[in-house]
Image (cartoon, rainbow, N blue to C red):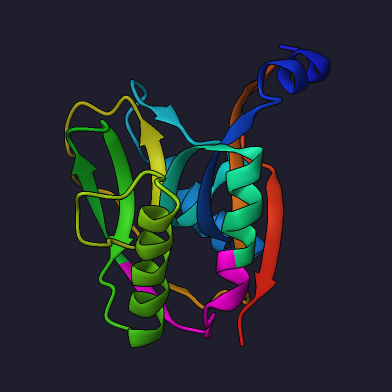
Amino acid sequence: MTNSTRNISTAAGKRVFLGFSLTTEQTKQIEAIQLQLPANVRLVPSQNLHMTLAFLGYASNETIGALINQIEAIDKPRFTVDLDCIEHWKKPKILCFKGTASDPNLLSMANDGQTIAQKLKLHQSEYHYNPHITLSRKAKAAVDGICYTTLTIKPSALHLFESFAGKDGVEYPILHSWQLT
């Protein structure tokens, strides 16, 4: 799909989500885990690795503007989360590196994200927030014997990402960013 085709087909809106970018060192640590995964899974490319805060689904351009304004108004405090477990999620068929949302600042932002999604009639998760990085897609089962160490995430910014199918696969450009305080 060419860029001009993408602009025509999504002129009315985009698939969006909130999340946090990884540092170069964190990306390398995730890539080392991915190298140990079975060959029958589709690895998430390194440029797409991120920690999701909230998947929001399809949003019109008008709704994206309102979303940016709503995110602008909430507290966006710094937080720390440790990702320390590789888990298979059956329904989306993914392997992810996950942790527990115990930092009140992270929990507050996750709750605010869901409140804003509800207010703007965007997708809301049916599950309790689980901080995670998707490692691979099309995973049919859990994996054992993967060597890794705990990954501590301390992001400095929250991002609004777009998700679209590009010519080389899914792409996640950043539409807007906010510094964490």
- Where residue 63 sits: x, y (%)? 58, 46
148 relative to 75 in the view: left or right: left
Quarter location, residue 36: top left
Q: Residue 82 colored magenta? A: yes
| Quadrant placement of the C terminus | bottom right
In the rendered image, the vertical position of residue 2 relative to residue 84, given as above or below: above
- Where residue 118 sits: x, y (%)? 35, 55
- Where residue 18 sits: x, y (%)? 51, 56
In the rendered image, the vertical position of residue 155 relative to residue 46, given as above or below: below
Q: Residue 30 colored magenta? A: no
Quarter location, residue 54: bottom left
In the rendered image, the vertical position of residue 6 relative to residue 62, given as above or below: above
Q: Which residue is located at x 62 percent, y 40 percent?
A: 172
- Where residue 126 sits: x, y (%)? 20, 49
In the rendered image, the vertical position of residue 105 relative to residue 10, given as above or below: below
Quarter location, residue 140: top left
Q: Nearer the viewer, residue 158 or 70?
A: 70
Q: Which residue is located at x 66 percent, y 61 percent?
A: 24
Magenta segment boundaries in residue numbering: 70-83
Q: Which residue is located at x 60 percent, y 28 percent?
A: 164
| Quadrant placement of the N terminus | top right
Q: Nearer the viewer, residue 44 or 58?
A: 58
5 relative to 139 in the view: left or right: right
